[in-house]
Image (spheres, rainbow, N blue to C red):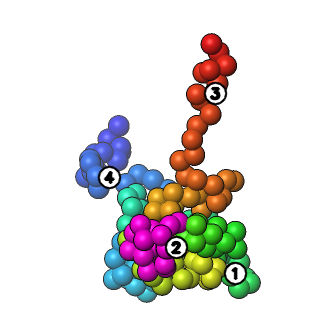
Amino acid sequence: MSGAAWDTEAVKIGKNAHNGAGGPREKVIKSQSALNAAKRSGAAVATEKKYTTGNAATKPAVEGQRLTMVDRSDDVVPVKKVSKEVSDALKAARKAFVTADGKELTQKELATKASTAVANIIAIESGKATPDQKVLTALERALNTKLRGKNMGQPLHAPKAAPAAAAAKK
């Protein structure tokens, strides 16, 4: 028993005791200087972009799967645009909305009511805007009209058919 490793070598206990495969371990590098040092040493370096974050509330249009598809594609991928149905529904709802003066709602008045820029309204109505869910939600609430989904162009809060069903039960 006199030739055991614990007799002749210092035994490391704790976080510095590495008894593994002996090869370089996979490590997440968070700084640019550490990345450059790893490249200079000749280590295998793989870079991956993190598309989403834990609290992505500040980024309303995060499209992780789409960005991955664009990243892996060799072709030029066109940018998503608002569909013609959305722009037509917005135009019709804005023209049908009557102000207190008895006039139809202008793009500027709608932008003020929805707390967005006039350029956004113009771009959506012309079909050149990229879809932004926050802007579309604000426009739906301002016009009380659905601009997304299967009932596009219908009132947002349509009267429910529950009273007729309740009368049929009696």
Q: What amino acid does circle 4 point to?
A: Ala
Cα distance between the residues tagged 2 and 1: 39 Å
Q: Which residue is mark 1?
A: 77
Q: What amino acid does circle 2 point to?
A: Glu
Q: What number is the disc on residue 164?
A: 3
Which quadrant would the N terminus be assigned to in this image? Answer: top left
Badge 2: residue crowd in 10 Å (few <14, some 14–19, many ≥20): some
What span is colored magenta in the figure?
97-114
| Left or right for 61, reference 73 | left
Badge 4: residue crowd in 10 Å (few <14, some 14–19, many ≥20): few
Q: Which residue is mark 4?
A: 17
- Give whichever of discs 2 and 3 has the lower sequence position: 2
Q: What amino acid does circle 1 point to?
A: Val
| Left or right for 90, reference 34 | right
Residue 75 in view of the camera: yes
Between 87 and 49, the one lying in front of the other is: 87
Cα distance between the residues tagged 4 and 3: 75 Å
Q: What number is the disc on residue 104?
A: 2
Please state the horizontal and vertical placement of residue 23, each as a whole percent of the image. Answer: 49, 64
